[in-house]
Each structure stands twice: as structure tokens, then as C-alpha cells.
Image: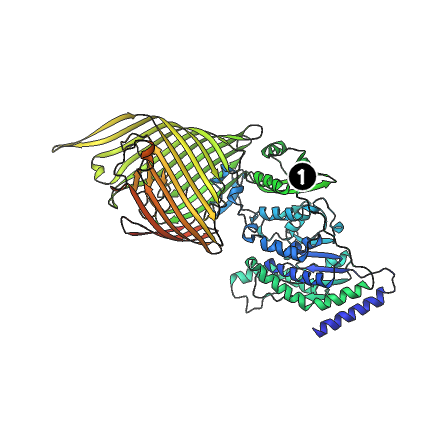
Amino acid sequence: MVRRIFVILFFLLAFFQVFGQQKGRRPKVGLVLSGGGAKGLAHIGIIRAMEKAGLTPDYVTGTSMGSIVGGLYSIGYTADEIEKISKEIVWDAVLSNKIPLNEITFEEKEYYGRYIAELPIDGIKVGLPRGLIEGQQLSELLSRLTRTVHDIEDFSKLPIPFACVAADIATGEPVVLDHGSFPRAIRASMSIPTVFTPVEIDGRLLVDGGLVRNFPVEEVKAMGADIVIGVFVSSDLNTKEELNNLIAVLTQSAFVTSALDSRRQKEMVDIYIEPKLSEFNTGSFNLCPDIIKKGDEMGEQFFQTFKNLADSLALLGPPPAVYKMPQKNEYLITEINIIGNQQISSNQIKRKMKVEEGSILSIDEIEKQISLIYGTRFFDKVEYEIVRHGPISELNIIVQEAPDGYLKLAVQYDSENDVGILSNITYRNLLLPNTRALLEFNLSKNPSLDLNYLMYIGEKQNAGIMLGLEYLNNTLPFYEDNIEISRFDSDFSKFFFQVQSTSFRNFAFGGRLQMEFSDLSPRVGELGRVIQRIQNRDIGAELYLEFNDMDRRYYPSKGNQLSLLFKQVFQVKNKISQYSEDSVSRTQFTIEQFLDPFVAFECHYTFALPLSGRFSLISNNSFVLSTLPDPLYNIADYYFLGGFNPNYPNASPFWGVYDKEFLAPNFFYTALGLQYELFNNVYLTAMSNYLDVQYPMDLLYNIQVDNYLDGKKRRLGYGLSLGYNSPLGPISFSMARDTSYGKVLANINFGFWVR
């Protein structure tokens, strides 16, 4: 420490001798912040020490995480403000593709967040993405934080002149970003290759500058810095002994050039600072407070150095005046410009928004519109800039259209349904504009198919029409006293035409005409001696209203999901192929019958209510009332009840009994659970559930209460589940017991659930 102070004093003496003779000439100070992922949060502590010492840099440069901290500092944020921002950010969400479910348009929710991989399709050719993460949430965050300078394209005109460095992935050259879109420049500087998608600026494909220039000292000197303060939070090359695994070798191979360049850059630094961060890595964002504390500790060690430098510079002239530009929360938007669109017209995008030019918009409302556009899934990325012209502003919306289509893949295993491979092919604007064509199929012992074609209609695309086909092959067990007595092979298919509202993210209503077919054949059990085949056909119509603002599909912590359905079946046709036996022969005969039309009403409601700390209250409720005539042959209009995660169209879970153990046309189901997040994305859930096939339905309509629940009218069960919301889908182990049986059932699940 003593030696370092001596060097600084000697350095200052030299400056006095050189610049003291030049009237008004004050040495310029440059601050350089290296990249280093989460370790870059230590920069905050160094900046805080500089602020306390009264030392303000004349220039700031940064790479990757250093560009974020340095960029915010250069536009007027204090160290305390940057620390507050960094602690409030949900880093797992920002540094991922996990857009909250409640920001996805309603017609896309059903297919969102259910796949391990999404591969782009160009024509009919399947490719690989340029990165795992588009960074939509990161881009939105940067746009929000830097909105005061969206209209400043020359970064030398910022409160503190600033530049950041990215790498041209095509040439391997460092690219200095000192003009253009400020948030886009920062986003480019931290586009980690293969993790974040590259950013195109001025025709160049840019990735994280840490690949070639992780410590941009040359750049700050080129801006005019005479004295360079450099904060380095990255790592040097590992030793031979440390390169003992494949990952270590690959990582070092990617950053050899950058590490050697950083050594050269360090030689040009006058005040070199390297916080002690060996216990952290680039992904330690969950340790944000600890990393900032390490920066504070190192900043305190250099406080006197900063103070001496600030006092000495003050003798040569006043320090640069730093100001924070006023941050508005409302803007008078007189013009909306769409940039980057090719296939989808600007008018179509504007019509999807719920604002008009000439409106006063809050920053929250602007971001809501950005989310609405992105939530349509027609775009891979949607960014915004607010360009101010005195009291009025322009809103620039920069879009990156999605490719022609996507191939989406997932794998699931659960002990109730075995292994399944889920594939989804989705095309946008196929055959006609403003359309979505979708084919999803599940390859498993219970294969299924979902094919539909959606077209948005109306000037503002507030409605959509859909043609669709659904098919499911399944095995349906029949139980008596908790023992399986027979098993049927089942084919279920549905054709439908649907009209639905599409103007809301979390709410939809509509109606559909449909024709349903079911075909059952006994596989195991005594029923096979009597029944050969049961065929059913329904023709009907449905009206529905749905609401869903859950924050995520799996392990939600807050939100509501409501589904109301009124169904009118106009025609019900049964065809039953049976056997008749006597002592001499066995005869096959067929009975065809038309049942009376019937109506049904369904209400399904789920909510997640955040409690104190990491607790959430979870509840799942269903009420189904039907005037269905009783013959059990009309199986397509009954509900299968039981299991942890049933995947049949008309099915409801009930913890404590086997999958699809009960069958009923009318029922009331309620489940109440307490969910606790043990660790990040690891959840423990205690659940109880209740099932009733008599009340309250019998109070509203004189239903027939049959032997639906093994001779009982109501059941009670409870259980525990331990789950991990992994990138590959939920992984869980669950155990439950029904009070009537006393047997404990278990379930293991791995992967995204088949709906």
C-alpha cells in the first residue's frame, strides 16, 4: 500500500510539472471497468469510494458487465442508486428467456414455456439458434433505465462521456460503441456468445467485447484520459494444474486472446484495482450484496488514493460537473415509428397496440404495449426508444421478426404415463398473413395430436378464427375397490371451428362448434366377453370465458386462472357392439341409439396467493354439472378423476388414488396447499384435496348419484411434493394418501407436462 501511494504521488508531481505551466490545463481522468459477469457488481463499491473522495472521472469505458455499471454511472446514476437497482433486479429472469406467463397473449399461453429447445425453421430447413437467450427482458430493463438519454446518439455528450466495447464475431475485431442507441450498445457489449444472441449494429454482428477487449484501457486513453483508473474483476489464464477438465479447457480456449490483451491493457493503467473475488464466479448474481461488499472493501483501501488525486486535481481546475438528466414517467407520444419489420406491416403492429398517437403514456404503459407485441410470438425481440423533442416525444419500436417457423421439442417422464417426446411445429403467416399454423404431437404409449390454424381478423386484430383437430389414444382403466378390473383402449378425436377474442393478454371469450368422437375397445377384463366396441359421437356448441394472469406455468407464486364453460350437445349417438352367448354359440350384435340432448356447465378456478417470505397459498377448484343421461357408454362426456397429473382431455387430479380411477359426469373438487420455496426454484408443497359427486350439484339439479367413487359420495386425500423447476422442465417426487384406502401412492415426474 505504501509503495502504491508513493507511485501515485510521484505521478501527480510529474503532472504538476508538465501541466502546471499550461494555464487552464487540467489532467483528464478515465475510469475503465472490465467485464466479469456477476463479479462486475464489485465496480459499484469502487465508484462509491470515488464519490466519497470527490473524484469524478472525465471519461468512462466498460466491457460487458462493466458497460452496464459504467453506462448507468455515466448518465448520472449514483453508486447507491446502481446498488439499489442491482438488488431489485430478478437476475434469473433478466438473464433468461423466461418471460412471465402473464405477459404472453392469451392464445399463445397454452403453448408457451413447455419446451426444452426451440429451433428456427427457414422454409422447410431446420437450423440452430444464434444463442440460447434472446434477452428480451434484459433489453426492456436497459431501455427503461436509460430512457433519459434515448435521444442522445453521441455518447460524448452524456453527463460523463462514455464508450463500451463489443466484438465483431465475423472479423474478431473489437468495436468501439460511442454513438447510436445507448441501451442497444450496452446490450451488444454483453452478448455472451452462444448464450445471448448477437446484436446487429451498423451491419456488424456484435457479441460480448470480453472475447477480444475485456479491459478497454486503450479506448479511454483515445478519448483523452491522462490518468487511468482501471478496475479489473475478471480472471487471468488458469494454470496447467487447473485445466483438469473439458469445460475448463474449452473456456480457456475461448478467452486466451482476451486474457493476453488484458495483460497488455493493464500496463497502461495508472491506478490498478483488482477486488478479491476468487470465491465468486461470473454467474453469482444471487450473491449480489456480497460482491458489492467486496467492492466496498477494496474501495475503502483506495479511498485515500482517490482523495489525494481529487485534491491535487482541484488545484489545477474544477472537477467535471456531473448531472443526472430529469427522468420522466409520462410522455406525450405524437408519433409511433416501427423499425425492423419486413413481413408484418407497421399498421398491423400499431393496430395491435391499444394506444393512439397524441396520447400521454406512462413508462409502464409503454412497456405494457411492448410486452403485448412480444407476447404475440410473431417477434423474437421487441425494443423501444423514446426520442424527446421538447415537450413531445417519438416512440420508436424496434422489432426483430421471428423466423418462418419453429420446431419445439421436449421430453417427459412420469410414473403415471411413462415416457413421452413432445414435438411442436409452428409457422407464422403460412399461406395467409396474420395467421398461425400449429402441429403438436406427443410420441408415447398414449400418443396425441393437436392441429390448428388461427387467423387474426378485424382492423385491430381483436378477434381470431380457428379450425382445429385434436386426437388422443389412451388406455382407460376401470377400478373397483381400488383394484383395476378392466382396461379399455380409447381413441378420442375432435373437430372444431372457433371464434375467440384476441385483444387481451390475460382474458379471452368466445364460442365454438364441434364434433367429438370416441371409440373404446376392451383390452383386459371380463367386459371383453360382453362388449366388443363402444363408439360415440357428439355434435354441440360451447361458449367460454377464460382468465389467466399466473406468473408462471409451473410452481406459480401469484395469479389467478379461471375457466367458465357452457356446453350444449345437440346430438348424441352411441353404437355398441356386443356379444351374446349361450351354451351352444357366441353371437355378435350391434345396438345404435340416440340419446337426448343435454347441457353442461363447468367452472375451474386456480389461484396462487403470495404469503410472507417464500410461502404461497395454492388452490385448485372444479365444479362440473351436467344433464347427461346416465348410460355409461357415453364415456366422452364423463370426467376421469384421480392421479397427480392426468393428461386426458376430460380429467381432473385427485391426490391419493390412481390415475383415472373414478369416473363421473358431475363433481365438485377442491384442493388447498401451502407451497414453500426451499431454495431458488426448489419447492415443497403440502396439499389436501376433497372430491364430492353429490353436493352442491344436487342442490341445483336433481342428479343421479351412482357408484362413482367406489360406493362413496365424497373422498378426502392429502400429500406432499418436492419439486425443482429446472430448465428441462419440472422435476418432482410426490406422495399422497386417500383417507378411505390408507394406501400411500407415489409419483415421479421429469420434464414439461403434456397438457
Q: Position of residue 207 (x, y in %)?
A: 63, 51
The quadrant of the picture occupied by the N terminus is bottom right
Looking at the image, which residue sits at the far front? Answer: 699
The residue singled out by tag 1 in the image is: 395
Foreground residue, 590 or 647?
A: 647
Q: Is residue 467 left or right of residue 484?
A: right
Q: Is residue 58 left or right of residue 707?
A: right
The quadrant of the picture occupied by the C terminus is top left
**How many circles with numbers are drawn on the protein?**
1
Residue drawn at 73 percent across, 71 percent down: 5
Q: In this view, does 424 lie above or below 703?
A: below
Residue drawn at 49 percent across, 53 percent down: 612
Q: Quadrant of residue 231?
A: bottom right
Q: Quadrant of residue 632?
A: top left
Q: Where is residue 643 in the image (x, y as percent from the top left)?
A: 34, 46
Q: Is mark 1 on a helix, strand or loop?
A: strand
Looking at the image, which residue sits at the far bottom? Answer: 2
Looking at the image, which residue sits at the far left? Answer: 583
Whether residue 156 is visible here, answered yes or no, is yes
